[in-house]
Amino acid sequence: MDTAPLFRCLPERNERVRYITPTEIQRLLGELQEPYKSMALLAVATGLRQSNIFKLTWKQVDFVRKQITFPEDVMKNGMPLTIPINETAMQAIKPWIGKHDQFVFVLPNGNPVKELLSKMWKNALARSGISNFKWHDLRHTWASLMRQSGEGLDKIQEMGGWQDPKMVRRYAHLSTEHLAKSASAIDRVLEMPDQGVLVSYGGR
């Protein structure tokens, strides 16, 4: 073809942001069977994607440096990722030491986890009183709670392995503490009547 054909592009759709509260997280974990309970705990502790958790190997876990490293060939964006292991993540991983030579999380029969059992997940959600929630939303939950705790979008992007900052800006509205100082600048201005600034507004 001499020239590329013209196609009308569809508008980009923003991915939904569905997250649950810490109380709901505890209820959900209480209804999940192992190894999915530990895997879900690791998801909300680190924001890791489902595939990275399901296929997590002991070679990727470094207990000395307290970090998990993923090579580029297992990452969705094709970029290597190293994240620190916090205490919650450590609680999710340590009980599985010695269960399998290669994979961290395994089924009761000793085989690696290959997929999420949809019926088991659906029943756990129903028993915990949570609706319209997917496993991937555990990643959204991590990012949302991190943002609500005051963490910067740049750090959330780095730890979450997002290459495009637009993906992280979905969580920007969940915290305004970092804007409080800037917002209060107008207070200082309105407290200066000698500058001819209105200090009250009586309009309709």
Image (cartoon, grey):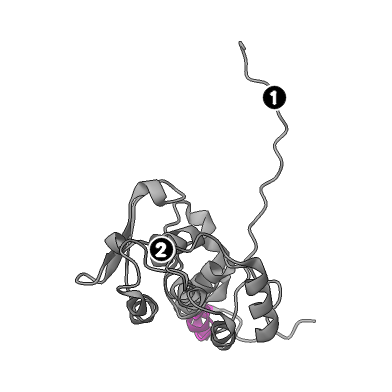
Q: Earlier in the sequence, mark 1 or mark 2?
A: 1
Q: Quadrant of the C terminus?
A: bottom right
The percent coordinates of residue 96 (x first, y second) are 36, 75
Identify the mark at residue 100; answer none if there is no mark.
none
Q: In this view, does 82 lie above or below 178?
A: above
Q: What residue type is labelled 2?
A: Asp
* 179 is higher (above) or lower (below) than 50: below
Q: Where is residue 174 in the image (x, y as percent from the top left)?
A: 56, 75
Query: Residue 94 occupies which quadrant of the picture?
Result: bottom left
Residue depicted at x 58% and y 68%: 137
Q: In this view, does 111 lie to the left or right of 199?
A: left
- Say which residue appears at 68% left-offset and 73% top-offset: 122
Task: Name the one closer to the observer, 95 or 16.
Answer: 95
Q: Name the residue under label 2.
A: 154
Q: Give the magenta-colored segment's residue range.
A: 183-195
Q: Which mark is residue 6?
A: 1
